[in-house]
Image (spheres, helix red, strand yellow):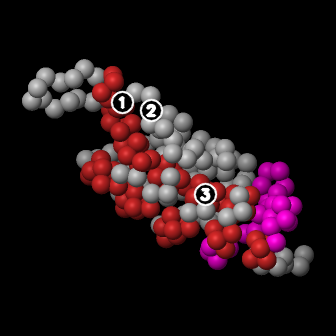
Amino acid sequence: MNDAPPNDTPPSNTSPSDTSPAPPPGETPRYSPEEIAQLFLDAARDGQADLVAQFLQAGMDPDIRDGRGYPALILAAYNSHLETVSCLLEGGAQVDLRDDKGATALAGVAFKGEVAVARRLVAAGAEIDAPNLVGRTPLMFATMFNRTPMVAYLLECGADPDRRDGEGNSARSIAERQGQAAIVALMPRRRPA
């Protein structure tokens, strides 16, 4: 999927130890604000909830983005780190903050099929039908990738199977075109026009 960060995104090519000289013995290393932000984002992506909590307690902005526009919450959610997602939300992360393509954390977990993480995001107020820049919703992503349990959960939460994206597709039309009878069967009948 091109609307979420790649799974298991590798760490940046440089780390603070690569760019900063070693401090003299007995002194604490000093990091630039950019290096500190990268350490926080790496911790969110890697699911280090305890470290993320320490950054947040020290005043880190929970909505900081990486160089590709992904906020910490999307990095943690997409990589299935429920505890880190909870930590970020409790630390003030905006549940529906969008990446540069307009996708929310819920869209990423819908694509991956991570129902437990989706439940946490929805409990925090995530918009069920939040469209990205081309109009695709979390339900559309779950349908495209045949994530039946996720489709069932999103429908249970009120997702609209007939909402159309910018190309005129709906979750229902995607499921029908892909021959996903089990997913089509989950969707409520179309309302008469």
Alpha carbon of mark 2 to alpha carbon of mark 3: how far? Answer: 23 Å
What's the amino acid at mark 1? Ser
Numbered badge on residue 159: none
- Residue to which mark 3 is pinned: 112
At 30% from the left edge and 54% from the top edge, which residue is drawn?
50
* Residue with the most extreme top position: 21
**Quarter of image, res 27:** top left
Label 1's element? Answer: loop
Residue 92 visible to the viewer: no
Q: In the figure, 179 relative to 167: above or below? A: below
- The residue nearer to you, when weighing 8 against 169, is 8
- The residue nearer to you, when weighing 39 against 133, is 39
Evaluate if marks 2 and 1 touch, with contact meaning CB atoms under 8 Å apart. Answer: yes
On the image, the x and y values in percent for residue 171 come to 77, 63
Q: In the figure, 159 relative to 130: above or below? A: below
At 76% from the left edge and 71% from the top edge, which residue is drawn?
183
Disc with the residue nearer the chain's start (2 vs 3): 2
Q: In the figure, 190 relative to 83: above or below? A: below
